[in-house]
Image: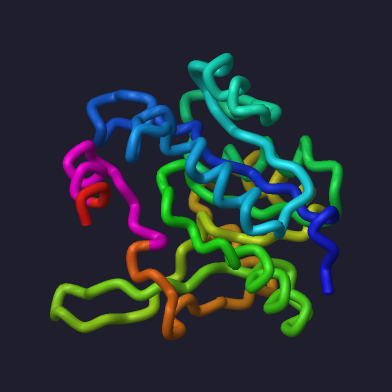
Amino acid sequence: MINPHDITGLILAGGRGSRMGGVDKGLQTFNGMPLALHTLTRLQMGGGVGQIMINANRNLAAYESFGASVWPDGLADYAGPLAGFLTGLERCETPFMVTVPCDTPLLPLDLVPRLAAALEAGDAEIAMVAAPEVDKNGQVQLRAQPVFCLLRVELLESLVKFTQDGGRKIDAWTALHKTVLVPFDLPGDDARAFCNTNTLAELRQLESS
């Protein structure tokens, strides 16, 4: 079993927040506490990581106040989550890194242990969450959630080449590597755990649900 001290957590908070009117999404409050701090606390409570970093491109001091190291993108112009992956892998000092977005205050406490177990069992390079979502026909389907990944740090070289060649899409990069999907649809799993709060209205809705 992978030792938690061999896994670094990376919270992705580097986006523009354009669908929230340009506000810094990770600093918006959920039940009185910033979203990113909820996410950080859930990672710590789960006990699956040794240390935690935050990828942010503004309000760095606010994020640093959470007690984690904060690193901005190395790629220019808010290049998306993959830029955060790259920044994290460049700074990661452990053999593995797990990525989570900043807007998931209901993150499963057992997220990292389940990803780690699947990575080992599948002898994979990446373990990725697959979470239930309702499709346009009203059917519940498992859908890959590529911003929730456990990665081997030696993938840094591959990601550097991919981004240098102009690649920006996570799924296009992960498709290059042996990836195992980890379903989070067991009895007792919270169906809201991987809800993205892209607008302030969605955030308030999640808060009241």
The part of the chain drawn in magenta is 193-205
The quadrant of the image that shows the N terminus is bottom right
Position above or below: 184 against 68: below
Given residues 151 and 168, the one toward you in this image is 151
Given residues 74 and 32, the one toward you in this image is 32
Residue that appears at 72% across and 77% down: 117
Percent of width and height locating residue 150: 67, 61
Q: Residue furthest left?
A: 137
Residue that appears at 15% across and 79% down: 138
Does residue 154 appear anywhere in the picture? Answer: no
Percent of width and height locating residue 44: 65, 49
Q: Quadrant of residue 192?
A: bottom left
Q: How many marks?
A: 0
Percent of width and height locating residue 83: 58, 38
Residue that appears at 42% across and 55% down: 106
Q: Is 16 positioned to the left or the right of 66 in the image?
A: left
Q: Is 8 positioned to the left or the right of 144 in the image?
A: right
Coloration mode: rainbow
Percent of width and height locating residue 123: 78, 79
Position above or below: 155 against 187: above
Given residues 184 and 136, the one toward you in this image is 184
Residue 46 magenta-highlighted: no
Residue 195 magenta-highlighted: yes
Q: Quadrant of residue 176?
A: bottom right
The quadrant of the image that shows the C terminus is bottom left
Q: Is 143 positioned to the left or the right of 3 in the image?
A: left
Q: Quadrant of residue 17?
A: top left
Does residue 106 appear anywhere in the picture? Answer: yes
Residue that appears at 57% across and 44% down: 41
Position above or below: 117 against 209: below
